[in-house]
Image: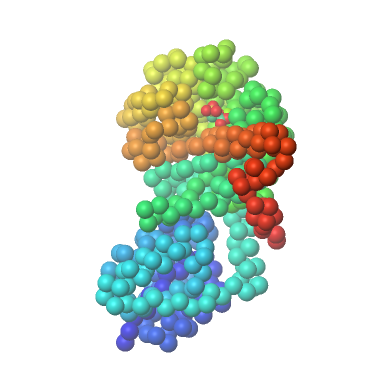
Amino acid sequence: MKTVYTCFCTDIIHEGHLNIIKKAKELGDLIVGVLVDDKMIKYNRFPTKTTDERVRMIEKLDGVSKVVVQDEIMYDKIIRNLKPDYVIHGDNWQDPGMAVIRDNIINNLSTYGGKLVEIPYTYNSVIQKKDKQMIEKLAMPEFRRGRLKRVMSLLPIVKALEVHSGLTGLIAEKTVVTNGGEIDQFDAMWISSLCDSTNKGKPDIELVDMTSRFRTIEDVTEVTTKPIIFDGDTGGLTEHFVYTVRSLERMGVSAVIIEDKTGLKKNSLFGTEVEQNQESIERFCEKLTAGKNAQLSDDFMIIARIESLILEKGMEDALKRAFAYREAGADGIMIHSRRKEADEIIEFCDRFRLDDKDTPIVVVPTSFNHITENELAEHGVNICIYANQLLRAAYPAMENAAVEILKNHRAFEIDKKLMPIKQVISLIEEH
Ligand code: SPV
Ligand code: MG
């Protein structure tokens, strides 16, 4: 009896999967692989069922003789172990990253004469509807909110990308790269006060009010499913912060980060070039505790951001605050620096981790941008936020388009640098 292998990366079984099973049975004994949770996040979207639940779901299907867990997106290990005569797969290779997977399967099978069998991918209106329902479910506040914690438990480091609109949200949601045979995408989104304000033509001084900031969150949540970390600036008055916490929870935001400044807050990257004051430890702890007491869901996180290094108050002050904020109930610590080298961030992380192995650490490597995600993870960092790169990429491109039109008295010269209008109008899927 020949053996046939296929990998299912799905939460639901539909006609398409049953079709694969039917075709596979004609070829031999079918072994189905279930792609493990942490790889599902990279390959496709967040699974609504755990690996174990998905294994049990597939074990119940007629025509499946064995279910195994596939713990890599690429097929090297699984093909080496199972040596199937055939791998069967739908012909949906045009999806991002799929061409690399196809090459990988063919290369592995060719080492012993195995064959890839491709069958027409089934995508009818019923399947399309189920697919959309899954995405809708993932976007719902109660499902989205807890996802940051879940992603943190699955990945060595979570990568969050700055978003300030529906369009940038779509970029964070959908950008997938295949790099060195690996597939990768962002795990979360950061709604930056700097970029949200700048996008509205306003300075980053808590001038854009919460109602307007919430509007940005809604623009993003309407078109995405990934978890959201919200930049809450100073959190404002404690009496106001407790309301903000509830609103954010209701919107499905996973975490708010508030910084220990008081009075007129300026952007941290100004450092000591402008007047900025740090809040007392006691008062900031009170704000954190009030926020935690106001929180109703279990999965929302309040992360305390320490500005001691930004304001040149020293490492000892930063560490003292970190432990005090943790005791006050903070679910995580963000440590910020505007040095070009990551040395003070690394020192902080290493020293904090001597005492505390668990409390999540968040960093924003805007100025110390040489350090890689892996290096940060080795020093105990859990979340790495790319806080402003999309806005900084867009502004010079837009300004250049304006300059070129003015200089040439027509749009011909700039046109080759622009996205074709046909692509713009098909960029957004209609539902
Ligand atoms: C933001 O993105 O608004 C931040 C990070 O708070 S920073 O600009 O580096 O202060
Ligand atoms: Mg900010």
Which is nearer the eye, 254 or 179?
179
Q: How far from the left and from the top, in percent, is residue 366? A: 48, 30
Q: How far from the left and from the top, in percent, is residue 317? A: 42, 17
Residue lying at 46% horizontally and 27% vertically, measured from the top left: 367
Residue 376, relative to residue 221: is it above or below?
Answer: above
Which is nearer the eye, 110 or 151?
110
- How many numbered circles does the render carry? 0
Asked if residue 191 can be seen in this view, the reply is: no
Viewed as shown, does residue 253 lie left or right of 65?
right
Which is nearer the eye, 401 or 136?
401
Residue lying at 50% horizontally and 37% vertically, measured from the top left: 386
Q: Ligand 1 sits in which quadrant? A: top right
Residue lying at 54% horizontally and 19% vertically, measured from the top left: 270
Q: How far from the left and from the top, in percent, is residue 342? A: 38, 27
Residue lying at 64% horizontally and 58% vertically, measured from the top left: 136
Residue 178, relative to residue 391: is it above or below?
Answer: below
Which is nearer the eye, 61 or 132?
132
Residue 124 sits in which quadrant? bottom right
Quadrant (top left, top right, bottom left, bottom right) of the N terminus: bottom left
Asked if residue 265 can be seen in this view, the reply is: yes
